[in-house]
Amino acid sequence: MSKSQTRVVVTGLGATTPLGGDVPSTWSALLAGESGVRRLDWDDVENLPVRFAATLKVQPDTVLPKQSLRRLDRNQAIALVAAREAWTDAGFAPSTGGKPQKGMDKAGVEGGFVVDRDRLGVVVSSGIGGLHTALNSYDVYKEKGWARVSPFTVPMLMPNGAAGHVGIEFGATAGSHALVSACASSGEAVGYAIDMIRTGRADVIICGGTEACIHPLQMASFGSMRALSTRNEEPERASRPYDKNRDGFVLGEGAAVMILESEEHARARGARVYGIASGAGYSNDAFDIVLPEPTGSGQAKAMQRALADAGLEPSDIIHINAHATSTPAGDVAELASTKAGLGEEAASKVVITATKSMTGHLLGGAGALESIFTILALKEGLVPFVANLEDLDDEVDLDIVRDEPRKLPDGPAAALSNSFGFGGHNVSVVFERAL
């Protein structure tokens, strides 16, 4: 980051995940090595090749009014849950549902700071969007006819629906965006949010990702691809990045949202700062719609470009929250790209974790959730360990956190959160410790 470039800080965190209904409970469970993976209780589950997933610990209907849920797809509902937590955590005044708040230029109004809505933006992504709505609505059409299809079907199934609802909820008029790049979607959302603040489009951005597509069609499709673990007899041990016996990823659901602000804006209101969102790097494999480019050059470029955007050197990185989904090829390929991106010496000193071992893979929501984990690891100086890692793959030659959380050294520090998606999308986001 150049000296003249606006510094972007993280001031609020929110999430609802397979480990907990908010950030504190999720983080506590993660450090304890708990699993959010559960057997599915569907009537026809025995007809599926995979009969488990990482489902939400707390259901949205216990948090949101049932009346509002009628107009929300599940992915939109949980995005609102996470956004509300992040908003409150940042110390802002309660939402007015899009209506202008009185005293827009004053702090301390209605129990929090009021943000100028023209300086407030939203970037909330989803890799798939309203899958449940699309499929359920088609069932209604086939069984009961077109007149019984909900008029809210299109707003509920569109991938930008979550961003739209969050923007309305908080009255954000600086811009509302939903970048769709499969499993890299919310990593890209964080990067876009950083750029929105740097370029002066907004002072505050609500950014993150959401995904809720645990459905028989998804389980069948990923199962047909042989992408999912089939460890049906012990689902909580199925996601096992870097283990010799890993056999695929575990599908997960959840939402994660952060509040990003210009440092100037955050300081002016006396905000608590979790960390610094220093930069992001992107690349495209341009190789295959599903398979990653085998040399890992695209992933390496994303890491290098993230460092350049942040104005950092490879030696500044002490921790990486890896994309590592628990697939036989993907995990070790990412380690090779890490060495190519940072250089052998710098990579050998990095502490690496893979939190999908406990949360499952949230697809479009993964990057934002793992960004939160990366920020908290730097802030608390503690990296979660990789669960279910019993027999380390012979090809793994970097420092993977095992058995218990790893303490990080004090002082200046930076970390990477990697997200890679179908289509060849590669995103790396850099965070720095706030001192």
Image (cartoon, rainbow, N blue to C red):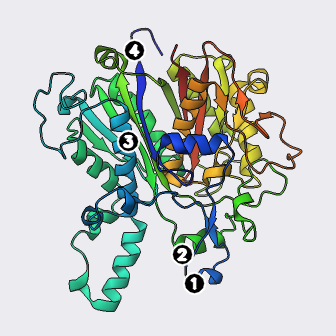
SS class of the residue under badge 2?
helix
Q: Secondary structure at mark 3?
A: helix
Q: First in sequence: mark 4 or mark 1?
A: 4
- Residue count near mark 3 (Cα–Cα under 10 Å), binned few <14, some 14–19, many ≥20: many
Tell me the distance, in whole angstroms, between the alpha carbons under discs 1 and 2.
Answer: 9 Å
Residue identified by numbered label 3: 85
Q: Is residue 262 above or below residue 183?
A: above
How far apart are the alpha carbons under marks 4 and 1? Answer: 55 Å
Tell me which numbered mark, 1 or 2, is placed earlier along the sequence.
1
**Residue ID for mark 2:** 216
Number of the front mark, 4 or 2: 2
How far apart, in angstroms, are the residues tagged by discs 4 and 2? 47 Å
- Rendered view: 343 above or below 47: above
Q: Position of residue 57 (x, y in %)?
A: 52, 57
Residue lying at the far top of the rendered structure: 3
Going from N to C along the chain, the mark reached first, 1 or 3, is 1
* Alpha-carbon span between mark 1 and mark 3: 35 Å
Q: Return the x and y of residue 31 as percentages of the image width and height.
A: 65, 40
Name the amino acid, label 3.
Glu
Q: Are marks 1 and 2 in contact (CB under 8 Å)?
A: yes
Q: Mark 1 or mark 3: which is in front?
A: 3
Where 176 sits versus 132, above or below? above
Asked whether the viewer can see residue 139, the reply is: yes
Q: Are marks 4 and 3 in contact (CB under 8 Å)?
A: no
Query: Can residue 182 be seen from the camera position used here?
Result: no
Q: Which residue is mark 1?
A: 44
Q: Is residue 52 above or below residue 406?
A: below
Label 1: how many Cα within 10 Å (few below 14, some 14–19, many 20+): few
Report the amino acid beneath label 4: Gln
